[in-house]
Amino acid sequence: MSDTGVWRQLATEVDAGNLSLRVDRESLDAAIKGLQDFIDHVNDLSIHVETVGFVTGFGGFKMGQDLAAKFTQKGSGEGSIRQRLKELIEEAKAAQDVLRKAAAAYAQAEHDNTQGIAGTAPT
């Protein structure tokens, strides 16, 4: 369910020189900050999610125990809300990384091209 693989693929494309991003510094900083604010918010939610990591209080009957086990699984098991929040954080961090790398790649290409043009004499 995670899109982290997409971000990893984009990072690979940036590293290979196949992807760059032209963006002004202010917009890049705003995007990185927006992603960081999102990460911080999800981290804040993670604290509250700990309360559903182990669920009790459905009584001693078999049905109550089964229900508690199902809610505990949703809270802390495989595919749990805890896991989903962790994936969101990983995706946002990967997006930040791709944005930074792609913007840096564009800036480097722009610098290289400018240097190349500056080295040519008019005819």
Image (spheres, rainbow, N blue to C red):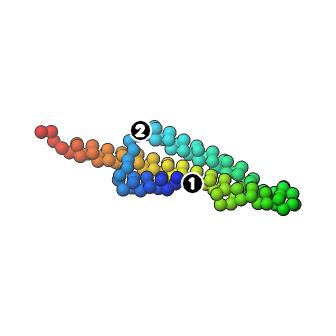
Residue 65 screen position, x and y as percent: 82, 60
**Quadrant of the image containing the N terminus:** bottom right
User: Which mark, residue 24?
Assistant: 2
Q: Earlier in the sequence, mark 1 or mark 2?
A: 1
User: Which mark, residue 1?
Assistant: 1
Number of other residues with Cα within 10 Å of mark 2, as a class: few under 14, some 14 to 19, many 20 or more: few
Is residue 104 visible in the rendered image? The answer is: no
Question: Image point 55% across, 54% down: which residue?
Answer: 2
Task: Look at discs 1 and 2 and give the one toward the viewer.
Answer: 1
Foreground of the two, 58 or 100? 58
Question: Image point 66% across, 53% down: which residue?
Answer: 81
The residue type indicated by label 2 comes to Asp
The residue type indicated by label 1 comes to Met
Check disc 1 and report its element: helix, strand or loop.
loop
Number of other residues with Cα within 10 Å of mark 1, as a class: few under 14, some 14 to 19, many 20 or more: few
Question: Image point 46% across, 38% down: which residue?
Answer: 27
Answer above or below: position of 39 versus 70: above
Instruction: Tell me whether the residue at label 1 lies in contact with that at label 2, contact meaning CB atoms closer than 8 angstroms.
Output: no
Foreground of the two, 16 or 112? 16
Is residue 101 visible in the rendered image? The answer is: yes
Question: Image point 15% across, 39% down: which residue?
Answer: 122
User: Which mark, residue 58?
Assistant: none
Tally of numbered tags = 2
**Quadrant of the image containing the C terminus:** top left
Residue 84 screen position, x and y as percent: 62, 53
Q: CA distance from mark 1 to mark 2?
A: 32 Å
Instruction: Left or right? Give the position of 106 relative to 75.
Output: left
